[in-house]
Image (spheres, coloured by chain):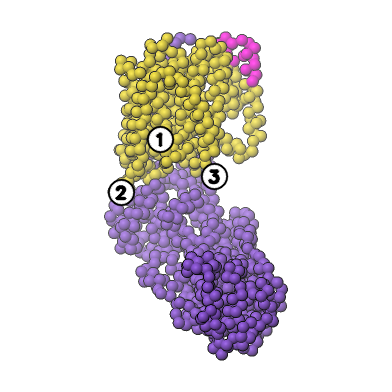
Amino acid sequence: MFNRKKFDWVLASLLIILIVMGCIAIYSASTTIIGKHHSTENHWWKQIIFAVISLTAVVLLLKLPMPIFDILIVPLFVVNMLALIGVLFVPAAGGAHRWFSFFGLHYQPSESAKLLSVLLVARVISKENLTELRQVAYGIALMTIPVVLILMEPDFGTSLVFVFSLLVMFIAADVPLYYILLIISPVLSIVSSLHWLAVVVWILVFVFLLIRMGLSWIAITISGIINVFLALIMPVFWNGLKDYQQERILTFLDPTRDPLGAGYQIIQAKIAIGSGGFAGKGWLMGTQKNMNFLPEHHTDFIFSVIGEEFGFLGSILLLTVFALFFWRLAHAIPEIKVRERKVATAGILAYLMIQSFINIGMNVGIVPVTGVPLLFISYGGSSLLINSLAVGVVLKYLNERGFIK
Amino acid sequence: MNRSTSAFSLKILLCLLFLFLFGALFRLQVIKGSYYRRIAENNFVRIRRVTATRGEIYDVKYRPIVINIPSHDLYLISGRVKNIDALGVFLKTNFGIEKEELHNLIFQQRFKTYEEIMLVDNISYETMLALSERLNYFPELVFRSGTTREYLYPNHFTGYVGRINEDEFKRYRQEDYSLNGYIGKGGLEKYYEILLRGRDGKQIIQVDARGQNLGFFRTDADVAPINGLSLVLSIDNDLQSFVQECFPYASRGAIVVSNIKDGGILAYASNPSYDPNVFMQRISPDQWAELNRPERPLLDRVCQGAYPPGSVFKPVTAAEGLEAGLINRNTLLAPCTGGMKIGNRFFKCWSSHGHGRTNVVDALRVSCDVFFYDLISRIPLDDAWRHAVSCGVVNRTGIDLPGERSGSYPNTEWYKKRLGRSKGLQGYKANLSIGQGEVLTTPLQINTLYAAIARGGYWIQPHFLVRTLGRGKLSREQVQPLDKHSFGWSQSTVKAIQDGLWAVTNAPGGTGRAFNVPGVTTYGKTGSAENAMGKTTHAWFTGYIVTDKPEIVITVFLENAGGGGAVAAPIASRIANYYVGNIDRFKAPAPIPDQFRDLEGEDENGMEEGFPHPSPHEDPAAVVPAEEDA
């Protein structure tokens, strides 16, 4: 139900600006100039078609009656999980099972899984009469399904996005902070086990925080012991692994360790962005891009093309637009009064934000994870459509303000 | 908790994350911008392919047939092209490369413009020296030394390699070919491409202009190339060169000699021949015309040409009669009076005098056509066809060469399709019985058939490869198991046919008495096949020699050269005499020479001693396993 007065024009305009910036970057990324020789792949107009389709889908979503939208979420989630299982049986492309391809189009089920999982988890954990423990348990149980399936692809970066948005949804659903702390504590214990001093500091901080949060002494003791045990057992477990197993895990967490594969791409992205300097080399003129040091620069490494051709100024402009866009999304959370929708909006914001941070961070060499496209900018139909729909969901919630409750 | 807390904390997080990115971008682009610009402009960081050395090819005594020799090649880096017109003029005047060709190359290379792509290979040293200075004007051009193939003698079995073309590059996308790579285009080079090729290595270049390691990657990540396997063939270079000299002047034909013991090919020659080395340079129009002249030197007449076999086919018909129990070795068939009436047509025997009534041994000895006319009139066509198929003269032998032709032998169905009837084929059948009409065989099939007869009816797939050298020493059976099977002939059948073949070359009146090799027992069969190519018959002779055990089988085939007994048998005789005269040398076991013994081990150092390849670039100072720049 479209409501002109309640429609968030600012958010919608920021979305369109991002998509347009993406098309400009993709046009450049699919163009190669050698001497006077000029050739362009057809990615850019495909992306424009995808953009039109995506925006149409957003409009249709806005017109969809809310009850139907609510009913659709569960079956779509189930179908999506089946697709995630199915994609594991598709022959690997580039070492991972991520896409279904038909008629030259790629569909990546993990993209739609992000949105649907967020919507479903939001609904489940926002039920009014749940205890906090149940909120946490249900949330984790539901999110484990897509996370495990996506880890099997393998796609570490995307799994991380799910975990992050789950934590943010817990906060938005008024789960006490010590639950969050307890959930992330094993990971921090494992990380801290790299150095004995880190273990000591971490455990002390951990216990201190729990005491401040007013947890019972029994709970503090148990969780403390578990974490100390984890931190102590990790080195033993790690040394028990064979060299190649260690190498495999490290490469999984940090692809730059594989210099002939992802590591090479990340270094080349850094060189591309760095060589762009303050003002950039000019649109279409990126030498790193034109000489094709980056094999996939229209997808995961599109930011490096922007950084190279538009320099620091251009990169900051894009960052600013992104920041405004997320700011506006965060701004929407208190506007929405229905608890489920508020939690869902927080989850959507979280996954969009962490995803763009991971992608840009990877391009500038501060985040090691790969396999996450830059939303609205990277070439790819399914990613653009789902991310636009996610924004569409928020726009829809804003439109529906005040109807129920 | 307050309702807007989550929005507030998300805004804080947003600010933190984006400040972080802002900082990283500022450091990368503003503080270190010029550093990265220099790296980008000079291609200091890239992955380079280290080409694996292609395996060489040796004869049975480890003497070279195909080797790698150094070459000078001109490469283009399309991403550095500034003035494409000047480049076009330069390449046109010096190497005859057309502008369109250059544009195509650049277009093909549009996704890897920093990679060097080969423009011209095998440039002479003088040309390279003369042009080196002009290259200063063209930073996109660079000379590199590489390797090329040298074929030590003209032949039809090694084939040759060539630059990979766009079709092949697409077809073998999974195989990691370089656009500069070579690929086998014919013969053994093509058939054993996978063994010969090896696997290219990869080397990470991360050194700046002063040779300092930029430290982006671990330095131990290079992938060493795995060199290709060398092939040891059953060919004997001495016999091969003798055989190649045996063709009469300006003749067209094929000679193949194989070892009866294991089916290995000892000599394999087709005339006129061509030199595979011509394919290693750009072929001039004159050379191209020469290769495509009417005599068709490129055609491998041993296994790619199928011809009417004539009388050398008669043992096939005889064996069917014997096996079916229609005759035994003493059965006398219709009297030959210089021919025989079949239906209402008179079929002539080659000798107008006639041979009288003959048994199978005599019929083979004098090559009497009438005996076989009469014999096949008692055999149903499809039985004869089935028998011919079982003798391996219809289907491909499966020799390890690409493009082998199958022979042909018609059956009822074939005639039905061709003539529209399956009755009244007596006349056609009569022709088939003496290897005329619709029967076509390759000289290789005939050679293999006679080798099988010499073994007492045991067929072994003919082949070149004996074993491979290098990492992973493989025998032929490991590379690809040989097809071996018995014809299932009875002892008496084998004996009757072998006696007939003995009589051809030894008994008075035998047609193949020119096959005369003192000191050994000889067997053979002549053939003079009428054909559509000319009035003169194709001359065939195929024979084998037996010392204390069967040795070699020689097949000589000459297009339109005359009678088999008069033209082909003397050539086979010369070859057999040469072989017998040097039999100790031919049969002496060949020890593996020392330089190849190193290769037998699995260690990589041995490989590098044996096969010099472009040595990987040495990193002067490189130990830090860093991911981040400092």
The yellow one among the chains is A
User: Given the image, on which type of amino acid does mark 1 rest?
Assistant: Gly
User: Given the image, on which type of amino acid does mark 3 rest?
Assistant: Asp
Identify the residue shown where x is 64% and y is 82%: B333
- Using the rendered image, report if marks 1 and 2 lie on a common chain: yes
Which of the two residues, B504 or B625, is positioned nearer the viewer here?
B504
Residue beneath disc 2: A37
Percent position of residue B413, x then y: 53, 65
Residue beneath disc 1: A380
Res B241 seen here: no
> How many labels were placed on the picture?
3
- Using the rendered image, report if marks 3 and 2 lie on a common chain: no
Please provide the residue range marked out in magenta. Answer: A207-226
Which of the two residues, B450 or B480, is positioned nearer the viewer here?
B450
Percent position of residue B135, x then y: 34, 57
- Using the rendered image, report if marks 1 and 3 lie on a common chain: no
Residue beneath disc 3: B220
C-alpha distance separating marks 1 and 3: 35 Å
Closest to the camera, between mark 3 and mark 2, is 2
- What is the chain letter for disc 3? B
CB within 8 Å, label 3 to label 2: no
Which of the two residues, B455 or B421, is positioned nearer the viewer here?
B421
Q: Is residue A219 magenta?
A: yes
Disc 1: CA contacts within 10 A as few (<14), some (14-19) or many (>=20): many
Task: Indicate the secondary structure of the residue bearing disc 3.
Answer: loop
User: Given the image, on which type of amino acid does mark 2 rest?
Assistant: His
Percent position of residue B312, x then y: 58, 77
The purple one among the chains is B
- Above or below: residue B629 compared with residue B433: above
Which of the two residues, A251 or A12, is positioned nearer the viewer here?
A12
Disc 2: CA contacts within 10 A as few (<14), some (14-19) or many (>=20): some
Q: Is residue B610 magenta?
A: no
